[in-house]
Amino acid sequence: MVKQIEPIWMKLDNAAKIYPAAMRRDWTAIFRFSMNLTEKVDPQILARALHATMPRFPSFSVRLRRGMFWFYLDHNPGEPELQEDVANPCVRMKLRENRHFMFRVRYYDTRIAVEFFHVLCDGSGGLCFIKTLVAEYLRLKYGAKIPRGAEILNCKETPKEEEWEDAFLRYAGRQTRSRQEPDAYFLPGASEPPDGIHVVTGIIPVKEVLSRAKAMGVTLTEFLTAVLIQSVDSIQRKNVRREGHLKPVKVCIPVNLRAIFPSSTLRNFSFFVNPGVEARLGEYSLEEIAAIVHHQMGLEVTEKNLRARFSVNVRSEQNPILRVTPLFLKNLVMRAVFYRVGDRKTSTTLTNLGRVQLPPEMSKYVQRMDLVLGPLSRNRAVSAAISYQDTLYYTFTNTMKSRELEREFFHRLVKLGIPVKVESNQQWS
């Protein structure tokens, strides 16, 4: 049995602080992982697996509380009630209806899915949780002996305190860098009613995309970003006739800081870069955009630059005046900052978790993995990619009535000779 630790309460990590202030009745920042198994999911065994997993993740056994000066996280006993999956994933999370937990576990047919409120964790922490949960499910159902380690936790081990550290505070430096940058082009179009989310997934052979990326001398993420930028720029040029009125087209790319600043935290520890092109200067070929993105990523994704960029947020949090400002005033300020320097600076988002590997003892039961990023507060069409075995699953989520961005993106891949099979939660052509 796992050794029980004292119930914990925590401050929100530096990245999480913005989300309670920015959330609205119709929006919370949600992302989702899912695994499709070889056989239909048994909900009773899944409930047992969740019960066994929760003590190993004490930083997930929390609820959001409102203090006088800051929101904070307090211990929440038990676990969320299992839910049958729905056609529209990543809709707003009503915490009261979820026993105040900030994640929900869903199932349908062969699929197990977990959706996370970004206050709780980032993609790395969420991926670790679903891997561990599914490993426990397979252990209970089939007696599978799955190796445990840093990515699939042993639920019989005692949790480690470093797994819920705020790594931003540990690595913040004295030097900071301004948040200022030009606003980006905003995709136009009428919105769907609340909770109306279109999900379109392209199923793509990884080797075909890698081959194209290598031919251009860029990474897979840089190649996909270039195609996405070209797709958005094409839409802009159809809607904005005067070249002088064209705006920059930029894509927000989250960066896992653990690759640069070693940390075992399961909470948020990622930042972002915004590569893009200045559309006013003329139309760009895909090769030109790929080269620009490659060099911008090389300049931005460095230890010193990333430290300076997230340190400005840490230093703001530590400002003596801000620290003693009542929460309702903080929320007004943080909400204004979020909408002024948040997703106004980018046209869309692409988060790529890369290739996910499971031990053979587990992969023989897992047929497919998906990552879905919930729409942002302003950018209503966003995308996420994850590679499992020989397949890249590239998923758009969109709260607009138009499917133009998805159509542009996948058609461009097909024109490059990359086969794409498209799935959607709604009729799409």
Image (cartoon, rainbow, N blue to C red):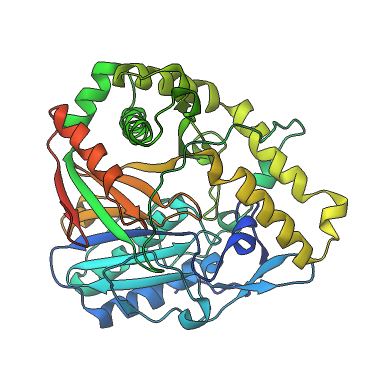
Residue 357 makes an appearance in the image: no
Residue 242 locus on image (x, y percent): 44, 26
Image location of residue 409, percent across then percent down: 26, 38
Pick whichever, 400 or 36, lies toward us.
400
Q: Residue furthest front?
A: 242
The quarter of the picture where residue 283 lies is top left
* The quadrant where residue 415 appears: top left
156 to the left or right of 362:
right
Say left or right for 25 vs 317. left
Q: Residue at x 13, y 69 (%)?
A: 39
Residue 349 drawn above or below residue 100: above
**Above or below, 422 relative to 65:** above
Near-viewer residue (238 or 337): 238
> Percent x, y for residue 276?
45, 28
For the point 15% across and 51% down, the residue is: 429
Q: Position of residue 413 (x, y in %)?
A: 20, 33
**Vertical position of residue 356 compared to residue 326: above or below:** above
Q: Relative to residue 174, is residue 376 drawn left or right?
A: left
Q: Which residue is at a point 49% across and 59% down the rendered structure image?
A: 29
Q: Quadrant of the N terminus?
A: bottom left
